[in-house]
Amino acid sequence: MLRSAIAFLAILAITAEEQCLTEDCSFTDDTSFLQDKIQVSQRLATNSVSEMAESEVITPNSNQVDRSTFGTRVVHFPPWIYIGIAVYLVILAIHEWFVYKGMKPLGVRGPVHLSWSVQIMGLWNSMAGFMGMSMQIPISLDFALSLNRGATESGLFLSAGIITGLLAMVAGKWLVDETRWNQRFVRGLMIVIPVICMFLSLASAVFVNETANSPNVNMVWWVMLAFIQVSSFIGPLTVVPGILFWTKITVHESKTFWMIMTQCARNVGLVVGPLVFTILKTLVTGDGERVSPRSMMAWINIFLLFQALVSSFFGISIMPTEIPNEPPKGDGHDSCDFALTGDIKPEELPDSAREEIVWRMIWYAVERPFTLAAVEVSTLMMLEVFYGWDPYWTGLCFTAVCSVGIVMSIFTTVMLMKGKFQESWVFMIAAASSIFGSILLFEIVPSAGWVLLVADCVIYTGATVANGIAEGWASRAAKEGSRFSNTEYRVRQLSAVTLGRFLGPIIGRFLVDYGGRNVYAVVQLVACFAGTRTVYKTCSLVWAGNARKLEAEKKKGNAEKLLPSPEKKDIKEDIKVKVPEEEAVEDSTEASPSDR
């Protein structure tokens, strides 16, 4: 029995040792077992936390886009595009030869300051640039994703040329001298620069279309950015000369009206751009398969070529070869003057207030373009990513809704011309409406995609009128020969707009991509509050001027009441009693020639 018990214990010990070796257990007492149990529990807890952390890593929302749905079809350019360019260049050369010999340009008729065609040319140039940019917004995300880039980089693609454009504006200021104006040279710039942009757009279109299926995506990406940089430097060289030309030929009192029209033109470009893209996409695609995003970007560049052609045609036919040396003056019956609104004119304010208006409007030129640029690119991205809308049709919806803002802007302008609204209060309300629009961007409860479009409509409506009044006030408050002259204001204002438009698409899409809709809405709300505050401080200067003007009129009226007025009896006696000298003069005039 004893031997059997010892043998059983030995077998049990060997079995336990083998089991311990197979399970990697080396404990020999209860304490080591408890310690190992704690270590295993800690390891399991650590692994669980790591898995949770890995599962909560923020991923870009753009990853939700299914890249397999991108088309691969490439649509090549027909020969008539190249033939049309050649024919236009021949016509251009013939026309300019006759102008060089002394002929007037075909579209120049009458005094330049009374020519609406010159104003239409300015409106076209304002609209064309924004239309070209907004056409690229619906396809920019797909284009960047097809090149293995993200949403933030697609915003960079839209903004890449803006800083270069700022340098071009500074260079454009050096090209012309406001005091020694050379109208023929400026006219040449307005013709030659668009022609150069035509060839750059053609080269860019051919390149991206021929590399539409190239696997070397990095090369395509960086070459396209290089094309953007070159085009963005050459194209804006005409901006400052064109604005100075407009300042010289536009009546002072009507500048606010034309600035509002300029804002309407820019917003028309922003709103119509996606619609034009949708039409272009329909024409290019036809009944065939879906077109590659790169090939569609090539066709957008062909449309940019057409825009440059129209701009050069305006320069050929409408730009005069000579303008008067003296600035034009209104006759007091200008239908574009807002004098009936009751506000004091900015040029009637003290120099300190005029300078403050100019600088505040320069700052406002950063805030509002940032808001609009972010709205343009971020809304279309949210509709595509969060709501699954087709990027080709989001632009069409964006166009339809925001067109309401343009109609309201035109209505407000008509009311200002008739004196029904006060200009300063329209400015204030238009700026404050953007706050309400930015509140609609928040998603407190699940909402439909059309709510975003309504928010954009409210923001656009206010921005169109507010920006127009802002530029009009600053242009009228600027004082020639001072540090806040129109030239200095324009360069700084364009720099501010450039900065806002550069940051808007990048920051807007970055916030949507990594923060979501509500984070983006918070930033927009802060920017709208800042812009409204700037407008309030500017309107306060005008309201103070109104109060001083009213007080001066009251004092003048009181002074006239204090002056003694002659009585009616005295007036009658003065009429009856005549001085002897006057009677002698009358007698001499009534006498006959023989008596004289």
Image: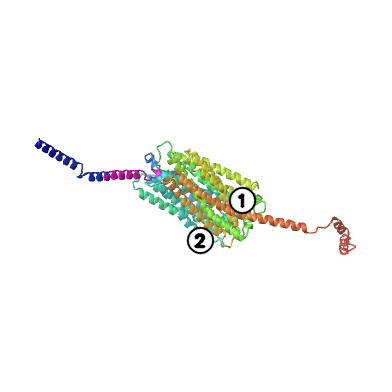
Q: Split into 4 quadrants, where in the image is the N terminus?
A: top left
Residue at (43%, 48%) from the top-left corner? 510
> Which residue is at the front of the view, 122 or 415?
415
| Front-most of residues 33 and 566 | 33
Q: Is residue 56 magenta?
A: yes
Q: Is residue 65 magenta?
A: no
Residue 51 occupies which quadrant of the picture?
Answer: top left
- Tell me the residue that label 2 is attached to: 174
Q: Amino acid at mark 2?
A: Trp
- Report the predominant secondary structure element of the magenta stretch: helix
Which segment is the magenta one? 38-62
Relative height, residue 343 to residue 281 (above, below) = below
Can residue 357 be seen by looking at this rendering? yes
Return the x and y of residue 289 as percentages of the image width and height: 40, 37
The quadrant of the rendering that contains the C terminus is bottom right
Q: Which mark is residue 424?
A: 1
Assess disc 2: are there few (<14), some (14-19) or many (≥20) residues with their C-alpha within 10 Å of its C-alpha. Answer: few
State the residue in front, 226 or 61. 61
Instruction: State which tag comes first along the sequence, 2 or 1.
Output: 2
Residue 321 in view, yes or no: no
x and y percentages locating residue 589 in the rendered image: 86, 61
Amino acid type shown at disc 1 = Ser
